[in-house]
Amino acid sequence: MLAKRIIPCLDVDKGRVVKGKKFKNIQDVDDPVSLGKRYSLEGADELVFYDITASYEERDIFLHIVEKIAQEVSIPFTIGGGIKEVEDFRKVLLAGADKVSVNSSAVRNPELIHNAAKKFGAQCVVLSIDAKREGNSWSVYVKGGRENTGIDAVEWAKRGQELGAGEICINSIDTDGVKNGYDIQLIEKLNRELSIPIIASGGAGNMAHFSQVLRNGADAALAASVFHYREIEIKELKEYLYTEKIPIRRV
């Protein structure tokens, strides 16, 4: 069995790492390069950096920050936000990123997933989905959680897999920053429908939440504030998961 992954998520706005709750009440946290380096040294498996306002503000990705991150971290990292065309994938990968995440732009132009996977390989393409529960299903939101597309999130994930995405990162807007646990129902449903890895995002509040989501279909667990504010240390989390018999790369 492949090892499960622990992935700190760094939301970046105007060059700073920020964090909110349910995509609102955004607060300043730290410098993305220094924080990314810290996580790299502390045993994170991967990192994800999202430029959270690039799509909404219709501007380009922060390539100068990507280059600095590549110089300082020794683990794979993903960049997302402001990716509009295949050429943006090329720029971000050349700047040092290992993977590129698409969200709003893929909803507007699904062929972007196919074309990027064809050119750079599925392993470089992550389809990130911001999902919010609507009754018994989940809808896809874009532009940083501001706009409801009316698209079913599970069906969109399946379509992303068909188009060539190598991973799905599912961000639950309902659980984001609340720290009451991941949306297990959503993860379980996606696990039944997909064959590619699933990264669960939104809701981590304690170590048991990581164990629960990794047992119930997630291949990786992504979290932000519990790591940013040192409420959970990555090494201690991995030791806990090891005792829980979850396959994990120990620090």
Image: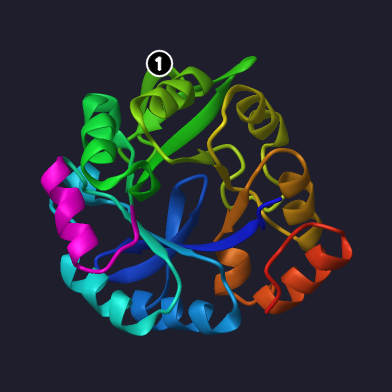
At a point 63% along the width and 47% down the height, the residue shown is 219
133 vs 144: above or below: above
- Let me know if residue 149 is in the magenta part: no
Residue 110 lies left or right of residue 48; in this view the side is left
Residue type marked 1 = Gly
Query: Which coloring applies here?
Result: rainbow
Give the quarter of the image for residue 110.
Answer: top left
Q: Can you give x and y, in whole percent of width and height, for residue 224 in the image? A: 54, 62
Q: Can you give x and y, in whole percent of width and height, for residue 19 in the image? A: 47, 61
How many tags in the picture? 1
Of residue 95 and residue 153, the one placed in the foreground of this image is 95
* Region in magenta: 85-99
Residue 50 visible in this rendered orientation of the protein: no
Q: Can you give x and y, in whole percent of width and height, for residue 66 in the image? A: 25, 69
Residue 117 lies left or right of residue 132; in this view the side is left
Mark 1 Cα shell of 10 Å, populated few (<14), some (14-19), many (≥20): few
Residue holding disc 1 = 150
Of residue 215 and residue 149, the one placed in the foreground of this image is 215
At a point 70% along the width and 38% down the height, the residue shown is 217
At a point 67% along the width and 79% down the height, the residue shown is 251
- Let me know if residue 93 is in the magenta part: yes
At a point 34% along the width and 26% down the height, the residue shown is 163
Of residue 45 and residue 237, the one placed in the foreground of this image is 45
Q: Can you give x and y, in whole percent of width and height, for residue 222 in the image? A: 57, 55
Label 1: state its secondary structure: strand
Most common SS among magenta residues: helix
233 vs 85: above or below: below
Residue 244 lies left or right of residue 176; in this view the side is right
Residue 107 visible in this rendered orientation of the protein: yes
